[in-house]
Image: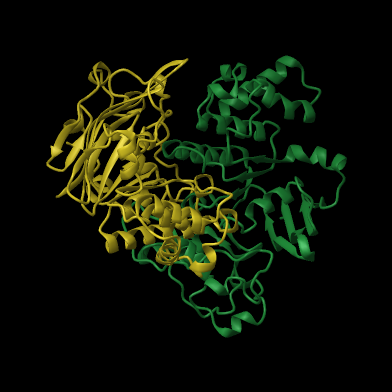
Chain colours: A green, B yellow
Amino acid sequence: MTALLSVRDLAKHYPMRGGRTLRALAGVSFDMQPGEVLGIVGESGSGKTTLGRVILRLMPATSGTIRFRGQDITRLSRRAVRPLRRHMQIVFQDPYASLNPRMTVEQILGIPLGVHEPMLGRTQRRARIEQMLHTVGLFGDAADRYPHEFSGGQRQRIGIARALICRPELLVADEPVSALDVSVQAQVINLLLDLREQLGLAILFIAHDLAVVGLISDRVAVMYLGRIVELATTADLFARPRHPYTEALFAAVPDVGGRRERVLLKGDMPSPIDPPSGCAFRTRCRYAEPACAAERPPLVEHAPGHFAACPRPELVLSSPLPERAAEMTRAAG
Amino acid sequence: MTEILAVDALSVAFHGEGGTVQAVEGVSFALGLGETLAIVGESSSGKSVTALALMRLLAPPPGCRVRGHAMLTRGDGEVVDLLALPEARMEAVRGRDIGMIFQEPMTSLNPVHRIGAQIAEALLAHERLSARAAGARVTVLLDQVGIPEPAERARAYPHQLSGGMRQRAMIAMALACRPRVLIADEPTTALDVTIQAQILELIRRLQSETGMSVIFITHNLGVVAEIADRVLVMYAGQVVEEAPVTTLLRRPLMPYSAGLIASVPRLEDVRSRGARLPAIPGNVPAPRQRPEGCTFHPRCRFVREVCEAARPPLEMAASDHAVRCVRWRDIAA
């Protein structure tokens, strides 16, 4: 099967004063299959948002390649990128800032249709818009209203409708539920799950909430300081994390089930301008040894499909799941 | 339980060109010495307005009208009504008896002053200290909240610190005069989970060291499970349930609380990946469009005609468990 998206050694650098360089993305590689949901997790500053934007060509890559449906799109001109946009779309975090307040919903959804399907007549276009609104759980008469007439959750549905109206194959969802009320978050997560089944959509799901990512993703990539440090199927990652950073991220999630004993991750993420030598995580890692400073550990396949960049593969890290559940998940995975 | 703060029938109404908004409707609760009370709610529940009313940080009449009483026992045993105190006396209470931390440390710290100077200002407002003594106290405070190299960091401007460090500086400022009550309004919402875990740990540690009481306002039930002794659930301006934390999370009686708890994705849910979350239908009502009767009835799966008739009273289901639902006995059965 050819990958829908194939990313190799992707880097995004920003020149800083004094000749220094901020490496927001420092060499990221992965493939995504059609219809696959790949979760991207990491703290702020890990590069996860930059990754989504560079892949969509919303900002240029410094080096590396992005292949979409087999075509190298890394250095296509703006004009040449435009027809690709109907196949790759984005949903933003903030449903208040990402919709033009002076346009009706019909006008907002009409823009991508006008660009990518200019041959559509007015009635056809209206029908497509109403159908799309229905798909995301809004009524057809929503088309004549303005964004301010909707709640946050409904606005995010409009943002999703705008992204999906030209039937893309790849959706980048950048923290699509984190600005929503708790009771509404679940609705939008369920909607994304439905859409994924109905439309066979591949989703690059960027989020900081590991529980949400666990529900929706087939595989998960964990990022730290511009690099992927672990990549595995969701079941494997949750049942047996193989990078201490993944273990620490899981341990930090507060659980409604009650207070847990936990090992806290110390300190902040170091600056991407001046990252530590060797393993970038070693300054916060409870398992670090002097050898970890020597060279940067490559992403190694420790089990089929389970990659981790830790120089100490012998470590047995704790899973966020109760022990029996972890075993069952591993067996089912 | 020795009470340090007793809030009785607190109501807040905002009057504007568009009419009146009843932000908070008759909120009553008691805060025990050394206790952590979580106030949980979604947008427009009234949780933050409740905190601002107690701190007397809302606009003066006629724009905003506050009713009710909030009796605070000060360090010397004097009991004052926070809502009736003249502003000059309130200035002596604010910061000294009650400290407050906010969600966005970047917007609540002054960007053009060094953080050490800002914390010293809080000290000098309430205590007779030389500048040198204040500086020394600042260093101790920054050390106490876990800021490394406190003497140097005191000379930093807010933008030179990470989000987690800024929130620590805010906490140092709020605790400068050893208040007996700390109000924390979504103090970890803007932070990464790893840093959130650090800040929660810090608040717990400081609380056990100083014996202060904490009102912790949040929308995150996982955080509630981590930090609270008792929980107040607010919806549409009213308290709808109050119980000890374990009771509330394990055996909630109000359908809204139960729905909210069920809709939070958990790490364990990875086992049922692809399954839908039990979402609460509909949206949080806007303050001007609160429904008649129980404000939650349009979204409630247990709704009956009786729920639309009148606002249900807050009933005691047990000596430490209050619920605002006319059907709680039927539902629990």
Q: Is residue B118 left or right of residue A112?
A: left
Regarding residue A290, the answer to whether it shows in the image is yes
Residue in front for this viewpoint, A205 or B186: B186
Q: Is residue A134 left or right of residue A100?
A: left
Regarding residue A241, the answer to whether it shows in the image is no
Q: Is residue B141 left or right of residue A272?
A: left
Q: Is residue A311 left or right of residue B222?
A: right
Name above or below for residue B226 compared with residue A318: above
Measuring from the top left, give residue B139's x and y in whole percent.
45, 66
Residue found 71% across the figure and 18% down from its top: A124
Residue found 61% across the figure and 16% down from its top: A144
Name above or below for residue A142 compared with residue B137: above
Q: How many marks?
A: 0
Residue found 24% across the figure and 18% down from its top: B310
Residue in front for this viewpoint, A18 or A127: A18
Measuring from the top left, give residue A100's x and y in whole percent.
66, 27
Measuring from the top left, give residue A286's x and y in whole percent.
48, 75
Name above or below for residue A55 compared with residue A286: above
Measuring from the top left, give residue B53's x and y in whole percent.
34, 34
Quarter of the figure that contains the N terminus of chain A: bottom right
What is the residue that sits farthest to the left in this orientation? B319
